[in-house]
């Protein structure tokens, strides 16, 4: 039985240059959970545990049906209240917005054959057998970002503003406008990778 590896199957989706480039991202579906707060907090860790628990439960269920797949890279959409925090650029936001004020939607891309019914049933089973309450917030999420500017950021998360400034400059000189939420794809496992070696795709939908 061949195992579907989305990172290889959708290679362009998981690839970026260290300079800003325009890409077009088609529709895809994701396992998703929303939250708010500091990504170094225990609450955020619990959110990720709920997401991965569900992702692996889906993987093993489909594997039993001869449709095995590799659990894909972790991703996240990040945003803040732009009414409360007005006139802050994308490059300055990570430094000027308290981490406690960031909203997030964490994502793991799923194969197209995964259905809403199976996700719903899997969530219900995990809640009843493992009593992980946060799993109740898991959903199958559809997203089509379309035109985006992206860059590969190499290094620690706290240095992301350096890469975001490059995106911002590219957006400004090409007269583009923001058209969606800041998107990060974590190509490295930040639990096992040295900060200076982390590789993260930063993606900004534009029009």
Image: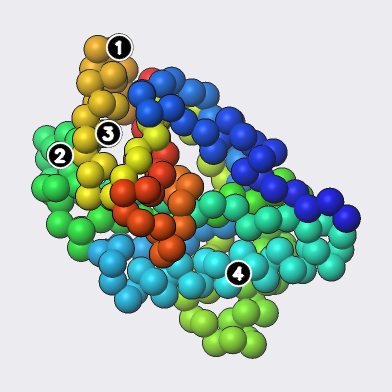
Q: Tell me if I can see residue 82 in this picture.
A: no
Residue, disc 2: 92
**Sequence-earlier tag: 3 or 1:** 3
Q: Is residue 78 visible?
A: yes
Choose mark 3 or mark 1, whichever is in front: 3
Camera-nearest residue between 76 and 20: 20
Say above or below: 146 vs 158.
above
Q: Tell me which residue sits at (39%, 34%) in the image.
A: 152
134 or 198: which is nearer to us? 198
The numbered mark at residue 148 is none
Q: Which residue is mark 1?
A: 174
62 sits to left or right of 136: right
- What is the spatial separation of the Cα atoms under label 4 and label 3, in whole angstroms? 32 Å
Q: Which residue is mark 3?
A: 163
Q: Quadrant of the N terminus?
A: bottom right
Give the alpha-carbon distance from disc 3 to disc 1, as whole Å: 17 Å
């Amino acid at each position: 039985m061949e195992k579907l590896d989305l990172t290889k199957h959708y290679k362009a989706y998981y690839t970026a240059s260290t300079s800003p480039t325009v890409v077009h991202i088609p529709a895809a579906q994701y396992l998703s959970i929303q939250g708010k707060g500091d990504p170094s907090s225990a609450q955020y860790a619990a959110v990720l545990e709920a997401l991965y628990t569900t992702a692996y439960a889906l993987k093993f269920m489909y594997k039993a049906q001869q449709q095995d797949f590799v659990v894909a890279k972790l991703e996240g959409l990040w945003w803040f209240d732009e009414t409360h925090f007005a006139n802050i650029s994308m490059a300055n936001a990570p430094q000027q917005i308290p981490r406690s004020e960031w909203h997030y939607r964490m994502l793991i891309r799923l194969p197209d054959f995964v259905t809403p019914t199976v996700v719903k049933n899997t969530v219900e089973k995990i809640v009843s057998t493992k009593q992980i309450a946060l799993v109740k917030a898991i959903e199958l999420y559809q997203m089509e970002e379309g035109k985006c500017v992206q860059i590969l950021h190499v290094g620690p998360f706290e240095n992301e503003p350096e890469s975001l400034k490059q995106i911002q400059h590219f957006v400004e000189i090409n007269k583009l406008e923001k058209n969606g939420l800041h998107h990060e794809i974590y190509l490295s496992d930040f639990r096992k990778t040295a900060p200076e070696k982390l590789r993260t795709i930063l993606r900004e939908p534009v029009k």
